[in-house]
Image (cartoon, rainbow, N blue to C red):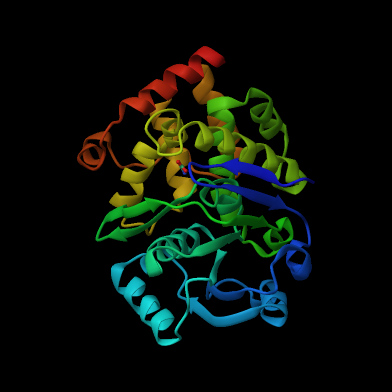
Amino acid sequence: MEPILVRSKDSTYPIVIERGLLQQVKVFFDIQKDYVLITDSMIPSMHYQPLLDTLSIKLLITLPAGEQIKTLSTYQDVLEQLITHRIKKDVVLLAFGGGVIGDFVGFLAATYLRGVSYIQIPTTLLSQVDSSVGGKVALDYQQAKNIIGQFYPPKAVFIDPLVLQTLPQRQWSNGMAEIIKMAAICDIHLFEKLESMTLETFDDDVIIQSILHKKHYVETDEFDQGIRQHLNFGHTFGHAIEAYYNYQKYTHGEAVAIGMMRITKNPLLQKRIQHCLIRYHLPIEDEVSLETLLPLVSLRSEERRVGKECRSRW
Ligand code: GLY
């Protein structure tokens, strides 16, 4: 298919979605460029071996898997590696992994030498449909998630749905939560499809539809001051639940699933969301009380607005 073009304030970047893209390196990547490939230890190396074989990779950095790398100390370590290897401004950083790698490498790219190019190559369902699109990049500080960040769009997003073949089932569910969220806030037809589909009958069109919606939100409100905040549906409680359990008990999508159930008051809408979450093996409740969560929650008016908007569309 034709690339999806995303307009940002300073540039337009393509999202290329193609099965087998990573086997066609010379078609999609500029082989004249120098690259630094940053990935994590959970990603099977067979997925990026064609890049190592074909491109001028000046440095391969494999970080531990998990949110704990989004720290100033890992950032400093990686910066030191770039400096030691005399990585120059015309390099392209390759963010090869899930949302954590995307956030980390994007932040690194935004700041190294006052900004170098980077390409997002998301390898999880969640990062393909959500975090790789829109230019949000960040590190955490102590318990504060994404507190040090930037809007820094990638040069391109390359999505190869074939990499999902090695994705564990829990990570499929993790991504499905964001797809359900997207359908709930803006696309009744997609939602109806999710209500009858299963993971076994999942098709790439679900990825494409989710990305087209994300494109609409980020092009309309790149800097997250209005309508883009609709994407936070379920995230206010979701973030609080993740933080309460120290990011150990739930994946992001699982916490958002519980968050959507807690914030949705319309009984019909809640029932349909619940049915859909269960269908994709997502939790719908947790025993932690509202009173316990409230100190961790900053109830944001935009989420209440989303609740209203969902009701009016359904
Ligand atoms: N993941 C929410 C956003 O990009 O705004």
Q: Residue at x 74, y 69 (%)?
A: 25
Q: Determine the residue located farthest toward the bottom in the rendered image.
A: 84
Indicate left or right for 36 with 21 as reference.
Answer: left
Whether residue 266 is visible: no
Q: Nearer the viewer, residue 311 or 130?
A: 130
Residue 83 picture quarter? bottom left
User: Residue 4 placed where, x, y %?
Assistant: 68, 43
Q: In the rendered view, would you say 136 is above or below 211?
A: below
Q: In this rendering, is residue 299 above or below 52?
A: above
Say if 97 sits above or below 214 in the image.
below
Residue at horizontal 50%, vertical 57%?
99
Kindly identify the residue that appears in the image at 38 percent across and 56 percent down.
138
Name, please, the residue furthest toward the top.
Answer: 312
Q: Quadrant of residue 188?
A: top right
Q: Nearer the viewer, residue 211 or 252?
A: 211
Tell me residue 312's x, y (percent).
51, 12
Q: Residue at x 45, y 86 (%)?
A: 85
Pinpoint residue 197: horizontal percent, then vertical percent. Answer: 72, 37
Residue 54 place in picture, x, y as percent: 72, 79
Looking at the image, residue 287 sits to the left or right of residue 194; the answer is left
